[in-house]
Image (cartoon, helix red, strand yellow):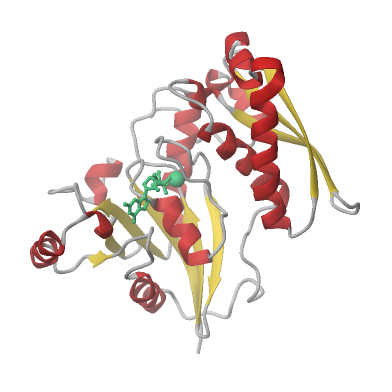
Amino acid sequence: MTRAGIVAVVGKPNAGKSTLLNRIIGQKLSITSPKPQSTRDRILGIHTTEHAQLIMADTPGLLAPQYALQRAMRGAALSALAEADVIAYLVEATEMDPPTLEEAAELESRPRAPVITVCNKIDALSPRALKRRKAARPSDVFISARTGEGIPALIEQLSALLPESPFLYPADEIGAQSMRFFASELVRETTLEQLQDEVPYSVACEIEEFREEQQPVYIRAVIYVERDSQKGILIGDKGARVRDIGRSARIKIERLVGSPVYLDLWVKVLPNWRRNEGSLKRFGYTLPEDHTP
Ligand code: GDP
Ligand code: MG
C-alpha cells in the first residue's frame, strides 16, 4: 500500500519554508534568502520514500498584498492551501506565541486538509528553552531545516496523513517544473545575494533561450529591474557585478543540470513591472481571479 499527495508548506515570510523544501528534496530547488519575499510562486518538489510520495508545494509567505505581484504571491499560497492533502504550517521556534494558520493567512474558515504546525529553527534555541517550548506546544513538530534535526520524523508524520494512492510521479523525479524555471530562479537568487535594500523586490528573471542539446548547455538569461538606476547598480563598475552574478549563478545551474553551462547574462529595464498585470503574466505569475486582496 502506498500513499501520495500534496503537502503545502505555508507560513509567514522567512519562517524557513524554502529551506525546508530543499532539505527534504536534498537539492536546491527553491531559492532561499535572509531577505523576506524571495519565493514568489508555488514551487513543487517531489520526495519519494519506500511507501509514500510527498509532492511538496513551497509557497510565498503569507502577507497582506500591496501591489499586483504580491496579490499573485498571496494567490499562489492560497491555491496551494486549497489543493493540499496535508498542510505543514511553519512557525519560528523563537516566536513565543505564533498565530494560528487561520490568523496568519486571514482565512475565514479552517482549511479542508489536516494541518501540522511545524516549529522551525530549533537550532537557534538553548536546550532549556527548547524543552520549555516543547512542553508548551505538545502537538507541534520541532525541526531545524538548517541542520536537518527532526526532519525524518516530520516526513513520517506528513506521509501518514496522505491519502492512499499510487505514486503520481516517477520515483526518481525531484521537481515538477522545468529546468528553465529552476535556472531562472537560481539567477534571481544569486542577484538577491548581491543586492541591498529595495532593489531585490524589483528583480525578475527570464530565460530567453535554453539549449540543452549542446555542450556546454547554452542559456541566455535576462535580469529585469524597474529603473535605470537599478540597472546601473546591477551592472556595476565596468560590468564587474553582473559578471560576478553570472559566474555564481552558472555554478549553481551546473549543479542542477549536471553538465557544463554557458550563461549569457543581460540586464534590462522594464518600468514598474511589479504593478503591471501584463508584465506579471509574462514572467509567469498568475493573478487570482478575484482582485480584492
Ligand atoms: P521562507 O521565506 O519561509 O522561504 O524562508 P527561507 O527558507 O528563505 O529562510 C529564511 C531565512 O531563515 C534564511 O536566512 C535561512 O537560512 C534561515 N533559516 C531557515 N531555516 C532555518 C533553521 O532551521 N535555523 C536557522 N537558524 N535559520 C534558518
Ligand atoms: Mg521561500
Compare residues 262 and 184 and report the one nearer the observer: 262
Q: Is residue 167 above or below residue 224?
A: below
Report whether 293 appears left or right of 119: right
Compare residues 164 and 196 and report the one nearer the observer: 196
Q: Is residue 22 above or below residue 62?
A: below
- Horizontal and vertical percent for residue 121? 29, 55
Q: Is residue 238 above or below residue 124?
A: above
Residue sitting at x 55%, y 60%: 45
Residue sitting at x 13%, y 49%: 96
Compare residues 119 and 34 and report the one nearer the observer: 34
- Horizontal and vertical percent for residue 31? 52, 46
Q: Is residue 266 above or below residue 37?
A: above
Report whether 274 appears left or right of 247: left
Report whether 290 appears left or right of 255: left
- Horizontal and vertical percent for residue 132? 8, 63
Furthest residue to the top? 228
Picture quadrant of ligand 2: top left
Is residue 96 something one can see in this rendering? yes
- Horizontal and vertical percent for residue 63? 34, 35
Q: Quadrant of the C terminus?
A: top left
Furthest residue to the bottom? 1
Residue sitting at x 38%, y 75%: 152
Is residue 111 something one can see in this rendering? no
Total labels: the figure holds 0
Furthest residue to the right? 214
Residue sitting at x 63%, y 9%: 228
